[in-house]
Every structure is written in C-alpha cells, then in structure tokens.
C-alpha cells in the first residue's frame, strides 16, 4: 500500500523541462535567467546587495590603490595630472628606513604578543575547563574584556595605570616598595613601553582565544584520557604533553595564524598610547601607523601610501600562506 | 463615544507623521548660523578648547548678510579631516587651516587671496604671514597668532637658588638643580620635547630650518651642539615624562610636578589664576656665541577651497570676517582663549596684552618670533622629529642623525621646487 502510494506520488511530479520531448517550446531568456523556481532571482536578491557592497567598498578601492601606487599622487586620489613614477614609490618605500623600521617593530611586537597570548589563553582554558563549579562565570569574566574597545583600553592604560607620575596606579604600587617613579611610555632605556603595549592587548584578546581553546579541549574524547590512565600515564604534565597538546593541534594552528595577522594589523592601541597632537615617536611605530601618517596624515602622499599598503598586504599574504603550509593547515588529519 | 476603527487610526497616524516630516523638512535646524538670505556657504573650524568660541564664531557668521553661512565645529583630528574633505566636492567653502601647506597650494586645493588681503598686508604680523605666501601670492588670511614660551615658577627657582635661564647651558644646569623626587626641573612634553620643540633649539643656536635662499638652514655643527644639550636634559633626569596631560596643558606646572614648562600663550590666564604673580615667562634660551632667544609663532589661516562652487562668495565672506571686521578679530583672539590678534594695530590696542607676563610674551613674539617656513614640508618635519627623538631618548649621535635629515630635506626641496 505504502509502496503503491509512493509510485503514484512519483508519477505525479512534473518532469523536468530538460526532459521535455524534442520539438517542445524552448524557454524564454527571462525564464532561463530567473532559473528554476526563480532561484537565481532569489539568490541575487539576497546576495546582490552584499556583493555590490563588497565590490564597491573593497575591491574597487583595492584596485584603485594599486593603480594609485604608480603615481606621484600628493593631495589627490585621482592620478590624472600626477606624474607616473612606475615602481618609484615601491623603491622609495622599500629603501625608507622608517618603513623598514616599522616592520622591525611589528616583528618585535609579534615576538612578544603571539607566544604570550597563546600561553595565557591556553592556561586560562585549561583552568576554566577543569572547574566543576562556576565555569560559566569564569568563562564570562575572562571573555568580557573582548567587548572593550582598544581605544578605551589604551586610554585607561595610558592615563590611569601606566601614567608616569607619582599618582599613577603602577607607580603608586611600586612606590610602596620604595621604587622610583617610571615614565612607562616615554622611556626607551629600558623600553618599558613594550610592557604597556603588550599587556593591554593581552588583556583584551586572551579571553577570545581562551574560548577557542575551550572548544578544542571539549572536543577531545574522554576515552583518550581513560586509556592513558589505564596505561599508567600520570595526570598533569605527562597527560597534557602526550594527549591534550597534540589533540589541540588544529586549534593551535588557527590561533597562531589569527594572532600573527592581528599583530600585523595593530594600530589602535599603538596610536592611542603613543601619539600626540605633534606626532608619533619613531620607536614602536608599526606599519599601519606609519602608512596612516604617510597617506592620511598631513603629508597626504597617497601614491606612496598606496605602495606601502600593497607591500604590506603582500607580506601578510605570503606570511600567512607560508605559515599555513608549514603547520599543514587544511591538511587532512592522519 | 464613537469607536475609532483600526484603518482610520492608521490613516490619522500616517497623516500626522507626514505633517511632522514636512514641518521638520521646512523648519529643521540645518546648522546654518547665517542671518543672510543669500547663497549658502559652509565654514569649518577645528574644535577650540576655550568655552564660548563656538558661539562666537556662529555669531560672526549670523552677522553676515550677503550669504547664509553655516558653521561646522569639527572635533577630532581636524587637519586630517580637512585634508580628506578637500579631495571631495562635499568639503567646506571657507575653512581654517594650519597652513595651508605647500602641497595643498601646489595641488590647487586653495585659492589665491592676495587681492583681498593687499590693502592691509603690512598690518599683519609678518612672521606668521610669510608661510602663507608662495610665488608672491597669499593663500590664507592669518586669524590669530599663537606662540609658545617657557613658564617658570618664581618661588621654586628662588628656593633652589636658580636664576631664570638666559642660555641653554643655564637651562640645563638649572633644570638639574630643580629636580628632586617630587618635582622635575622642566617639562617639554611626554616625549622629551621631540614633538613640540621643532626648530626652536636650532633658532636658539642662530640657525634656521630653511634659509632665506631656500636651502637647508641647519647643516652646521652648532645644530648638533644645541640638540646635544637637549639630550643632556634627558640624561640628567631633569625632564618630567609621563604626565597625565601633555605640554599644551599647564596642569603639570600647576600641580607642582615641574618647576618650568614649555607651553602655549593660551595657558597664561589659567596659570595666572592659579599662581597669581608666582610665575614668569621666557623665550627659549639662546645657545652659543651666534645664538639668539627663540620663540615659535604660528597662526591658523582662513582659506577658501578651490573646489567650492561659490568661490567668489566664500572669498567675500573670508575677507569680511578676517580683514574688515576688526572688532570680531579682536573678540576672537582675546575674549575666549588668549591669543595675539594677527593684526599689529589690534595687538597694540589690546588691554590684556599691555602688562605683566602677557606683555613680555608679546614682546618676545615681536622680537624673537619665528614661524616654520612654507618649504618645511611634512616629510621634513617627520624626519627631523624622528631624529630628535632618537637623539634625546636613544642618545644617538646628533651629527650623524642631522646629516641624514639634511639629505632628506634636500631631496624634498628638489621635489617641491620642481613643481
């Protein structure tokens, strides 16, 4: 009975248009553009606005920026009338010690922030994962700073915690132990400003990566731990080293990749911690701050700034691809 | 009571909304402050810190009858906002500008205002007018003169047995004597002076940024010697660093965090109110046998955008406000903040500038005032400031650092002179 009904239902379904007998009326162009059941129309209705926005605000400026980078374009975004300089801007940028110095700043920043964030967020995740009570509370506590803007956090760090006079929080605490007041952001010897820059980002982003690690930890099968216990593995470091850490490999690769890209894009906290109305010190000037001053500052050298942006984009792309290949991102688990 | 059905209620609600929309469109606040019924022009200002300034400039605009002038008061990074807006058609017609810069003039972004200013050209403070002239044409009308001076606390200097410094060596020695655990000798900004000092130590050594014949003005051993002494201030731990507010705010000076502070004339009323007569002002002290006291001066200029659709009306308004209406100029300079009127005749008449430290400051501006020349471009400034920062904080060799800056400035001079 059931089978008979199914057969009936199948025969009721209209045959696809393509299967219409030869000689039948071909579909009109409009109907073909609309697609079966007007799927094309609906597709473009939903996707179209976003595609147009993406093209207009991302791809057109991107192509325009590459085009602009071949011109001596001061105070103009229209290269017409500007001198064509070919690869001159690229040569100038790559031989500019300030730009190369900014890349050095980025490397130093990455060397600090990537391992520090990785270690802290993993440690937080391991701690929170072991909690039997109030896990949601502590997860929220550590995640909450992610909601704070970099600008606000930088201003708090600069004016309240690490200001250089005797009533700054850090100096007050150190003063209890008889230490002299320290100008945290103005001292280059020793370079205390790194402590301020790294801690503010660490506070802001460790919670986010902790959540990623927590998700990774919760995917590890408990049977693995049980098997390890049966085999006599000691809980703690031995289990972490031989089971937890290897099982987090995919999460670790993604975290490191995201951390490196984010470090390259560092701008807000650097700018708000170190700039003033008169400029920005040459130490701790990452590439984006440098390009901001070149292209959008009073200099308005949009040709040179565009060349720098293209160079920076290429460096990020190459670094990402190399890193992904190195860690085997996307490779099937063996 | 008759029951109102749902359709009628919606229709009535829609009617009210439409009427309200039309009313708002007809009589809404468009931001225009002008009382004129003529063409609409927009005027941009950066956000001044002094209360009352915004209302004052709106009042000036409203008093103009030949055009409907809307005032835009723009907080944030004004220089970058105007630089970006001038690339578009939606920028201002008339705007104040920290310049205009040479690249803005050469890029055709501002219009020539020579004819408008010519009748009273000699009455303007010449040091601030000079950087607004390119190829014998004037590209901006100076609004009000700002200057920087060295404030010192008389009682603290007396207690430490330090005389107000007249030379750079005396400044270095005095700042060291004035420094202890609670108070530092001198505040030049949280970056140690790299940002605010600019060419001031070079002028104090008898040099310049760009010479009168358009060449690098500091390719001289005296420049390295003067900058080396600024480094000495840092190395002696005589400089206040990391204050909650920077050099432009007198808070550090008033809170007793420093005995001397380099700041602007605008801070004078606030300091006088807090300290009474317990302070004095000085120019930046001279250095070496060829040196002379040095006082940086500058003026925001009123410029007209070349992309304005109403250039003639905008020029007429700028001329009316900054050339003809001397009463408004006087009010703008002295009733809210504390600036020197850009017109010499007005500065002489100003009662607030005729006695005490204010009178000293005006005299310093007249006798020792220098403004950054038009040929001193943004890349030059950045390269020099970076070098100064490396010298002061990193202890880099002043001679080799300055040699690199000289090469950079020479290259940029070739670029701008080619145009």
Image (spheres, rainbow, N blue to C red):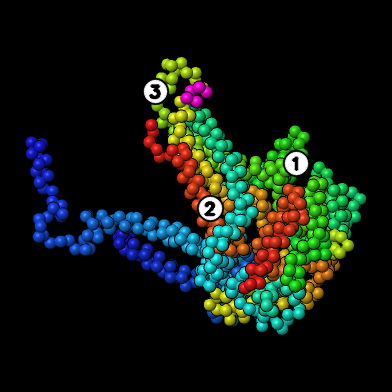
Location of mark 3 (residue): A223
Location of mark 1 (residue): A181
Q: Residues within 10 Å of mark 2 (few under 14, many from 20)?
A: some
How far, Cα to Cα, is label 2 from label 3? 46 Å
Do callouts 3 and 1 point to residues on the same chain? yes
Q: Which is nearer the N-term, disc 1 or disc 2?
A: 1
Q: Nearer the viewer, mark 2 or mark 3?
A: 2
Mark 3 chain: A
Is the stretch drawn in magenta largely helix, strand or loop? helix
Residue A302 included in the magenta stretch of the image: no
Q: Which is nearer the N-term, disc 2 or disc 3?
A: 3
What is the quadrant of the C terminus of chain B in the image? Answer: bottom right
Kindly check if marks 1 and 2 are in contact, taking CB atoms under 8 A apart as contact: no
Location of mark 2 (residue): A312
What span is in magenta? A237-242
Rendered residue at 69%/39% (across/down) = A170
Q: Residues within 10 Å of mark 1 (few under 14, many from 20)?
A: many
In the figure, B16 relative to A142: above or below? below
Q: Nearer the viewer, residue A98 or A195?
A: A98
Mark 1 chain: A
Q: Which is nearer the N-term, disc 3 or disc 1?
A: 1
Q: Is residue B33 left or right of residue B254?
A: left
Rendered residue at 50%/46% (across/down) = A319
Q: Nearer the viewer, residue A66 or B143?
A: A66
Do callouts 1 and 2 point to residues on the same chain? yes
Do callouts 2 and 3 point to residues on the same chain? yes
């Amino acid at each position: 009975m059931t089978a008979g009904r199914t057969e009936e239902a199948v025969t009721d379904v209209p045959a696809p248009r393509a299967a219409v007998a030869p000689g039948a009326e071909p579909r009109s162009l409009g109907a073909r553009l609309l697609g079966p059941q007007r799927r094309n129309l609906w597709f473009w209705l939903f996707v179209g606005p976003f595609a147009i926005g993406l093209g207009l605000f991302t791809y057109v400026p991107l192509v325009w920026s590459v085009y602009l980078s071949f011109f001596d374009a001061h105070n103009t975004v229209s290269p017409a009338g500007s001198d064509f300089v070919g690869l001159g801007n690229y040569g100038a940028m790559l031989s500019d010690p300030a730009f190369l110095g900014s890349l050095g700043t980025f490397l130093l920043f990455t060397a600090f922030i990537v391992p520090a964030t990785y270690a802290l967020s993993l440690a937080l995740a391991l701690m929170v994962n072991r909690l039997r009570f109030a896990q949601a509370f502590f997860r929220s506590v550590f995640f909450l700073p992610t909601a704070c803007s970099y600008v606000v956090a930088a201003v708090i760090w600069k004016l309240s915690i690490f200001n250089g006079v005797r009533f700054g929080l850090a100096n007050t605490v150190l003063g209890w132990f008889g230490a002299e007041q320290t100008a945290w952001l103005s001292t280059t010897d020793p370079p205390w400003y790194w402590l301020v820059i790294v801690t503010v980002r660490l506070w802001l982003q460790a919670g986010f990566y902790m959540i990623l690690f927590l998700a990774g930890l919760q995917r590890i099968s408990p049977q693995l731990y049980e098997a390890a216990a049966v085999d006599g593995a000691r809980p703690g470091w031995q289990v972490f080293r031989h089971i937890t850490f290897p099982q987090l490999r995919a999460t670790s690769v993604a975290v490191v990749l995201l951390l490196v890209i984010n470090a390259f894009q560092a701008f807000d906290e650097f700018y708000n911690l170190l700039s003033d109305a008169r400029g920005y010190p040459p130490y701790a000037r990452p590439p984006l701050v440098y390009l901001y001053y070149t292209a959008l500052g009073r200099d308005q050298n949009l040709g040179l700034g565009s060349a720098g942006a293209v160079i920076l984009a290429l460096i990020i792309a190459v670094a990402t691809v190399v890193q992904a290949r190195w860690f085997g991102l996307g490779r099937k688990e063996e | 009571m008759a029951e109102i059905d749902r359709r009628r209620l919606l229709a009535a609600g829609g009617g009210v909304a439409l009427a309200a929309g039309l009313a708002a469109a007809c009589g809404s606040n468009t931001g225009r402050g002008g009382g004129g019924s003529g063409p609409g022009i927009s005027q941009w200002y950066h956000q001044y810190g002094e209360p009352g300034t915004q209302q004052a400039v709106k009042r000036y605009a409203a008093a103009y009858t030949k055009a409907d002038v809307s005032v835009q008061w723009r907080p944030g990074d004004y220089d970058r906002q105007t630089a970006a807006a001038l690339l578009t058609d939606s920028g201002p017609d008339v705007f104040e500008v920290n310049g205009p810069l040479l690249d803005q003039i050469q890029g055709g972004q501002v219009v020539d205002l020579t004819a408008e200013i010519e009748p009273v050209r000699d009455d303007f403070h010449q040091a601030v007018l000079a950087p607004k002239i390119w190829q014998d044409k004037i590209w901006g009308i100076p609004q009000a003169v700002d200057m920087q001076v060295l404030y010192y606390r008389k009682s603290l200097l007396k207690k430490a047995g330090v005389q107000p410094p007249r030379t750079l060596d005396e400044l270095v020695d005095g700042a060291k004597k004035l420094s202890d655990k609670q108070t530092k000798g001198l505040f030049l900004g949280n970056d140690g002076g790299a940002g605010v000092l600019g060419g001031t130590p070079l002028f104090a050594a008898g040099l310049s940024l760009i010479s009168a014949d358009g060449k690098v003005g500091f390719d001289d051993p005296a420049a390295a010697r003067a900058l080396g002494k600024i480094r000495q201030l840092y190395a002696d731990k005589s400089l206040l660093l990391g204050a909650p507010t920077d050099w432009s705010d007198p808070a550090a000076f008033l809170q007793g965090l420093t005995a001397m502070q380099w700041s602007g004339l605008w801070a004078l009323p606030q300091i006088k109110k807090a300290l009474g007569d317990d302070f004095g002002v000085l120019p930046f002290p001279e250095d070496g046998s060829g040196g002379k006291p040095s006082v940086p001066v500058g003026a925001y200029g009123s410029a007209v955008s070349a992309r304005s659709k109403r250039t003639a009306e905008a020029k007429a308004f700028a001329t009316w406000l900054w050339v003809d209406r001397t009463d408004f100029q006087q009010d703008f300079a002295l009733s809210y903040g504390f600036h020197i009127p850009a017109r010499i005749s007005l500065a002489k008449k100003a009662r607030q500038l005729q006695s005490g430290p204010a009178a000293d400051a005006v005299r310093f501006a007249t006798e020792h005032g220098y403004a950054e020349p038009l040929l001193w471009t943004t890349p030059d400034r950045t390269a020099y400031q970076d070098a100064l920062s490396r010298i002061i904080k990193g202890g880099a060799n002043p001679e080799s650092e300055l040699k690199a800056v000289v090469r950079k400035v020479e290259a940029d001079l070739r670029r701008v002179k080619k145009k």
